[in-house]
Image (tube, rainbow, N blue to C red):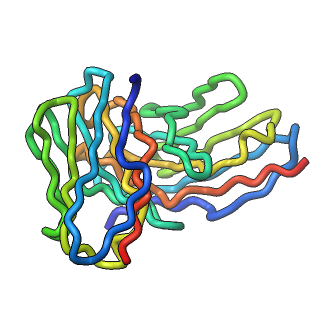
Amino acid sequence: GQNIDQPTEMTATEGAIVQINCTYQTSGFNGLFWYQQHAGEAPTFLSYNVLDGLEEKGRFSSFLSRSKGYSYLLLKELQMKDSASYLCAVTDSNYQLIWGAGTKLIIKP
Amino acid sequence: ETGVTQTPRHLVMGMTNKKSLKCEQHLGHNAMYWYKQSAKKPLELMFVYSLEERVENNSVPSRFSPECPNSSHLFLHLHTLQPEDSALYLCASSQDRGGPYEQYFGPGTRLTVT
């Protein structure tokens, strides 16, 4: 079967750095997405990786290793507004998007 | 209006009612999606439409019936639902299905079945 694993919840301190991991087992691979979802709101796109390596976008970076079936989202200089759920999703060989259950990130002052 | 809109935002219905959820996208996208989101579970893809044709139906019970009259509008018709159908229903659109195309989500309809 197809599976995406992420930690259920993480806690970090304002101003610090946090890494949210995602491992996947899917039928083929055509890209990996990270989305952010604040409580009560819709998910919004953060990043897309299809090649191995690190993609940096301001305070957020996303890394992919296709051989290991592994990605992480790195958030730097954490702000209180970064408290949200972070969803990892993988496009399989049929271009179907497989979603993880999300990681709830709690930022403490 | 910009982006993806959904109405209603909240809906309470009895198990014998019939109601419809509406989604509209103002982005000129070719693909539209219905998702179900339950607490602490992954997003469940229900239906995918590409250029107004249904291309995916992920074993969704027949009490959920989608309709895509044109590339900007998507409906989800509901009838004789069960309490376990209570969830957040999200609509999304993307430029095309698959590939590097990010999905844009509407705010969702919070559905409660009593």
Question: If the image is split into quadrants, where does the N terminus of chain A sit?
Answer: bottom left
Residue at 91% from the left image edge and 47% from the top image edge: A109
Q: Which of the two residues, A57 or B93, is positioned nearer the viewer here? A: B93
**Figure check: A104 above or below B96:** below
Q: Which of the two residues, B63 or A67, is positioned nearer the viewer here? A: B63
Judged left or right of residue A61, residue A96 is left
Percent across and percent down for residue A21 are 62, 52
**Figure check: A14 above or below B1:** below
Q: Quadrant of residue B69?
A: top left
Judged left or right of residue B54, residue A80 is right
Judged left or right of residue A62, residue B60 is left
Residue at 28% from the left image edge and 51% from the top image edge: B21
Residue at 47% from the left image edge and 57% from the top image edge: A100
Residue A4: tell me if it is visible: yes
Percent across and percent down for residue B18 are 20, 65
Q: Quadrant of residue B57?
A: bottom left
Q: Which of the two residues, A106 or A22, is positioned nearer the viewer here? A: A106
Percent across and percent down for residue B14 are 30, 75
Q: Quadrant of residue A8?
A: bottom right
Q: How many marks?
A: 0
Percent across and percent down for residue B99 are 30, 32
Judged left or right of residue B60, residue A47 is right
Residue A29: tell me if it is visible: no
Residue at 65% from the left image edge and 57% from the top image edge: A104
